[in-house]
Image (cartoon, rainbow, N blue to C red):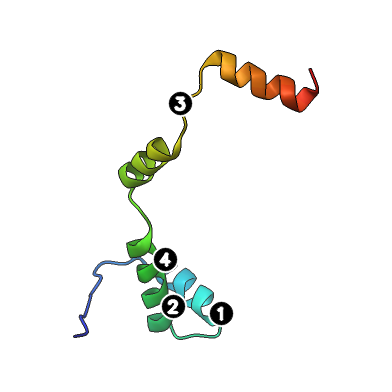
């Protein structure tokens, strides 16, 4: 089911900038904001991103790193 979000006390400058961006994409302000809100909602939080990066990183020793460099440089 659809939900309604209301934003109060938005300053005129911000409102006009959002309308300009929507117009430049050829969509209504509502369509533009829905797309941006979905993009924000689907983006990981900083903590989630950092945890993901930590899990993906490999644990190489200095010796292993030097060997990789030597291989790339051509010993």
Q: Which residue is mark 3?
A: 59
**Foreground: 4 or 41?**
41
Label 2 sits on a secondary structure element that is helix
Q: Earlier in the sequence, mark 1 or mark 2?
A: 1
Q: Is residue 11 above or below residue 19?
A: above
Distance from Cα at disc 1 to Cα at disc 3: 44 Å
Q: Which residue is mark 1?
A: 25
Distance from Cα at disc 4 to Cα at disc 1: 17 Å
Q: Mark 1–mark 2 contact, CB under 8 Å? A: yes
Image point (39%, 35%), residue name: 54
Label 1 sits on a secondary structure element that is loop
Q: Earlier in the sequence, mark 4 or mark 2?
A: 4
Residue 74 image offset from top left, x and y in percent: 80, 22
**Foreground: 46 or 25?**
46
Q: Earlier in the sequence, mark 4 or mark 1?
A: 4
Q: Which residue is mark 4?
A: 14
Q: Nearer the viewer, mark 3 or mark 4?
A: 3
Marks counted in the figure total 4
Label 3 sits on a secondary structure element that is loop
Q: Nearer the viewer, mark 4 or mark 1?
A: 1
Residue 61 image offset from top left, x and y in percent: 51, 17
Q: Give the position of the N terminus as an image quadrant.
A: bottom left
Q: Earlier in the sequence, mark 2 or mark 3?
A: 2
Image point (60%, 21%), residue name: 65
Image point (45%, 26%), residue name: 59
Residue density around tag 4, few if under 14, some if 14–19, many if 20 or more, within 10 Å = few
**Which quadrant of the view contains residue 43?**
bottom left
Q: Mark 3–mark 4 contact, CB under 8 Å? A: no
């Amino acid at each position: 089911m659809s939900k309604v979000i209301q934003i109060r006390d938005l300053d005129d400058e911000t409102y006009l900038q959002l309308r300009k961006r929507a117009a430049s994409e050829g969509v209504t302000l509502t369509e533009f904001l829905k797309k941006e809100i979905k993009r924000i909602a689907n983006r990981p939080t900083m903590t989630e991103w950092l945890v993901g990066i930590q899990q993906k990183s490999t644990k190489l020793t200095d010796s292993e790193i030097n060997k990789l460099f030597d291989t790339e440089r051509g010993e």
